[in-house]
Amino acid sequence: MTTTTKISIKLPDGSSKELDKGSNGEDLAKSISPGLAKKAIALDVNGQVKDLFYELQDADEIKIITAGERKSYEILRHTTSHILAAVVQKKYPNAKVGVGPATENGFFYDFRIEDHKITDDDLIEIEKEIKKFASGAYKLVKEEVKDVASKIAEYKKAGEVYKAELLEEHKDDNPTEYYFVDNNGVKVWSDHCLGPHLPNTKFIKAVKLTNVSGAYWRAKETNDVMQRVHGTVWWDEQELEQYLARKEEAEKRDHRKLAKTMDLFSTHELAGAGLIFWHAKLATVRQELETFWKQLHRKAGYEFVVTPHIAKSELWDTSGHNNFYKDNMYSLQVDDQEYILKPMNCPFHVLIYKDSRHSYRDLPIRMAEMGTVYRNEASGAVHGLARVRGFTQDDAHIFCTRDQYVDEIKGVYRLIEEIYSTLGLEFQMELSTKPEQAIGDDEIWEFAETGLKRALSELGANFEINPGDGAFYGPKIDFKVKDAIGRIWQLATIQLDFNLPNRFEMEYTSADNTTEQPVMIHRAIFGSLERVSMVLTEHFAGAFPTWLAPDQVMLIPISDSHNDFVTKLKNKLIQNEIRAKTDLRSERMNYKIRDAQEKQVPYMLVIGDKEVESGKVNVRFRRSQKQVEMTVEEFIEKMLEEIKSRSLNSFIGD
RNA sequence: GCUCGGGUAGCUCAGUGGUAGAGCACUUCAUUGGUAAUGAAGGGGUAGGGAGUCCGAUUCUCCUCCUGAGCACCA
């Protein structure tokens, strides 16, 4: 009779390891090397992350996950959230626990504490206690919940209604419970959780609680509001500090902060939230963007229209907005007539289309407008330039035949690519397909979705599919860019629309003299000028490339005696359409240079006796120590070239 | 819209139940400087708005507006 007391484990390098049956990941790590055993925190078992204490099975393919590797962070963070929960419950006995997942850079845990609101000062205390708890080197033990019904009852008795609810939901999934166990084998705290977790709390050292906020239980507005404690945790202090430094850098780039120091835009309590006042500096950036946009669109065969800001309510009945967008629309009562402030431009462009009969020979019609729209966004959603109530879309609608729309989409893609690459923005695409609530039959959706896919694949573009996330009126391609803080912003979008052509009974006459319905494509490239200005401000950290920079040159006299010369030179630059300013304050030159640099002015011209005599200028680029001498004419020529080419780089070099 | 913070000078912020302070910015004067903060003097706020409590409120309470983090929302 043969008994198998050995199992064989496959390792990533292809080798195998023989172990006693019943061995776990810790045993495996020890058998390989003591050093590995020290760093081992979890296992990758046949591609799934499991606890280190997982009992190995014969023929398992195991990779040992060690502290510091990519997959280890989620485990570290998740386990830390449980310690947070344990500590909070100890400190506030009435605290009921919700959920506590790992997030991108940290973790949170949701609590309901009827008799206490956690303050920032509390966080300092709680953080200390987390560290203290972690240093107690508690072992984490996973146990299956054998009698689920009585465990639920136990939770309910303790008032842990949220845990009871979760366990109730998972009662048929072999639910598990995690325990913190001390050196004497005593269980000090437990939580219903799937894991995986660290083998021991001793790994947790570099932890910092960041803030507390509100959140609905299970993200549902009608549910209880929980107190959500956020934190971040890393394998060591150095990593933590690097993370905090990154965060600080991101905060420095925050467009709302730069708006104040660089005088970009403002909002006013007197005017209302989410209504943007563009100051001259950011307005200059905007105008440059608009000019660029118009040039490219003109070349791409677009025609520009201008439409009103309000229209009678009946228009929005026809478009359907009164049904499905009413909450977001501002309305005006004038005499007995209701007017709506437009939340979108599309119905207006449709009206222009419908103002005359169209032949297939007219198509495609590409109708573009920088259209300012107003939407009553929820007060809590309003945020800087990112989410506002009044904004200008770089909108366009393409009306074309079914044979043309794939080519039209390719055309839009090329425009997007050209504009984004000029701005130095990388983007990714998502194709969103038919949602559950949708109009139009399957046939037309199929037609539209395959067309979008075909367009993208013929362009050789990579894209992800986002099933069921299309608009109710048609599928769409969203273009997303990443900003300095790592946030993903949706800017450009291309959407097919089966709804409006129907509702407005749009038509054209085909070559066979039949009446056909045109395909309608909505598209925006910047999305909104507000949002793209935010992304660019943060992307460049305020240091706009020369063509976009509000002030392109700062002229700095060395002493008052050079003021006249400097003023004349400024006027000469302005005559050449270079945005030049002078700094004639009675400050030291050093101070003025520093000031111009902080304001991110690309070029500084320092002018003293030497320059006045030689007719040359001393050119300095922001952030660079380099100084270059050249004649005024040469400088103008190089500037104009840099501006015209919309270069991202300085002719001097950084 | 919801939860929790916050709103004091142009900006960043301190402080106090008895009508308010710093740094930067601004103005003036002196300095006339060669590539990252010259020195001195001065002006400026009635405390987001409203109501209440109090002998008295910027400070306490309530309402409202704006704002931050998070949630919800986002064609």
Image (cartoon, rainbow, N blue to C red):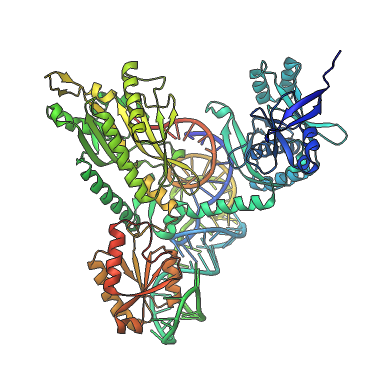
Vertical relation: A193 (above or below) B65: above
Between A348 and A604, the one nearer to me in the picture: A604
Q: Can residue A55 be seen in this view?
A: no
**Residue A120: x %, y % from top left:** 64, 47
Q: In this view, does B52 lie to the left or right of A443?
A: right
Q: Where is residue B35 in the image (x, y as percent from the top left)?
A: 47, 76
Tell me what residue is drawn at x 38 percent, y 62 percent: A650
Front-most of residues B42 and A440: A440
Q: Quadrant of the C terminus of chain A?
A: bottom left
Work out whether residue A282 can be spotted: yes
Query: Is residue A168 positioned above or below A84 on the image?
Result: above
Instruction: Give the side of residue A126 with respect to residue B26, left or right.
Output: right
| Quadrant location of the N terminus of chain A in the rendered image | top right
Return the residue found at the far right.
A184
**Quarter of the view holding residue A116:** top right
**Residue A15 position within the rendered picture, expressed as x and y whole percent measured from the top left:** 71, 33
Residue A284, position as x, y percentages in the image: 31, 56
Q: Which residue lies furthest to the top in this view?
A: A1
Looking at this view, is A79 or A86 the one in front? A79
The number of numbered discs placed on residues in the rendered structure image is 0
Q: Which picture quadrant has residue A460?
A: top left
Please tell me in which quadrant of the rendered image residue A19 appears.
top right
Q: Nearer the viewer, residue A279 or A444?
A: A444
